[in-house]
Amino acid sequence: MSEINKLKIFNDPIYGFITIPNALIYDLIQHPYFQRLRRISQMGLSYLVYPGANHTRFHHALGCMHIMQKAVDVLRFKGVSISPEEENALYIAILLHDIGHGPFSHAMERSIVEDVHHEAISLLFMNQLNVEFEGKLSLAIQVFQGDYHRKFMLQLISSQLDMDRMDYLKRDSFYSGVAEGNVNSERLIQMMNVVDDVLVIEEKGIYSVEKFLMSRRLMYWQAYLHKTSLVAELILTKVLKRAKELTEKGIILHCSEPLMFFMQHKITLETFDSENLDLFSQLDDFDIISALKSWQKHDDFILSSLSKMIINRDLLKIKVSDEKIPTEDLHILKDRFSLENNITLAEANYFIFKGKIKNQAYSKQAEPIRILKKDKTIEDVVEASDQLNLKSLSKFVTKYYICFPKQLV
């Protein structure tokens, strides 16, 4: 196929037309590893709360690449030197930054592919693609890992004001209908500059940064940490843990071969070889949903009950509180549930449990968002802002939850 046919465009509901900048990017998008992202939901089980939140990580990755193109244009216009090789590395790194996400990723990371973070798997995919593409991803991998000498390039990919956050807030707000999450990414990008190899936002863009941070806080409480999304993800984690437990006991469960492999084997980052990576690349949301549909008819009370909860959206009751949940409350509920259903107290842990969630819109410990003032000095946005609420956004807010079956209310 000639290169001219590879310069396609995508029609995106957020940005309009997204152009593929070159043939290499086209080939990466066409690769089965990347095409898998079409089958990975961006917001996990949030569609159980917001029916429109069915967009995928494929959407998100393309959106990130698009706004990275805008950022490169703006920085070049302001005199920042970015070579064609560096430009391409930025596009590849941001395009592939989420390629390691598994189906309903956070539930997977806490149950089946334990202790292997999606960013580590993203890097494994990038290294494998680099072999296939004869070293053309080497610079992108350097930038992604933070090993490249130009630090502002990493900040564009991974920081408190990166292309990833700018796209997912705008996109998730659009598809979920949570209007409070909408951010003005165009304005933020127009205000970007680089001083002493550090990404800065010009002072006149400070209000857009404040709005961005406030939007992030609201999206976490209203969407990502919404109590129904939270309990659905916790139930899915419990389902997968139970499935793995039964598999280890020699009980055969019906599911796809890749899912069965990860249930039968404990895979660590050290043992995550190219064969395992290939199996992981065959896993997507459909494997999990298909398994749940099968498992809801299983003889095991725990596996079938929890699977039905997700399939039929008849979830556990969840109560969220500013105060810690007394352990005695848990014991009373477990005793009653285990007696009523003739299961052990250990098995009742699958249905009755507690935990906590944290939300911090801005971290003062991480790389700061720097504001370039008119007198050319640079300040952390919290110090530069005249908004008192920005200081409060940098504090952790912790909430506590308890989950239990509705019949125990």
Image: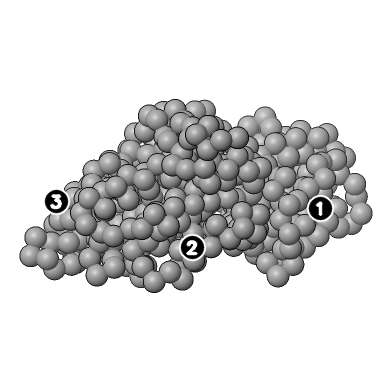
Distance Cα–Cα, label 2 vs label 3: 33 Å
For label 2, count other residues whose C-alpha is less than 10 Å away and answer few (under 14), some (14-19) or many (20+): many
Distance Cα–Cα, label 2 vs label 1: 33 Å
Callout 2 secondary element: helix
Q: Position of residue 220 (x, y in %)?
A: 42, 47
Tell me the tag on residue 213.
none
Q: Position of residue 400 (x, y in %)?
A: 49, 55
Q: Earlier in the sequence, mark 2 or mark 1?
A: 2
Colour scheme in the image? Answer: one colour
2 and 3 marks in contact (CB < 8 Å): no
The quadrant the N terminus occupies is top right
Callout 3 secondary element: helix
Task: Give the labeled residue for mark 3.
Answer: 204
Left or right: 331 as drawn, with respect to 382: right
User: At 56% from the left edge and 35% from the top edge, which residue is drawn?
Assistant: 2
User: At 60% from the left edge and 39% from the top edge, which residue is drawn?
Assistant: 30
Task: Give the labeled residue for mark 1.
Answer: 261
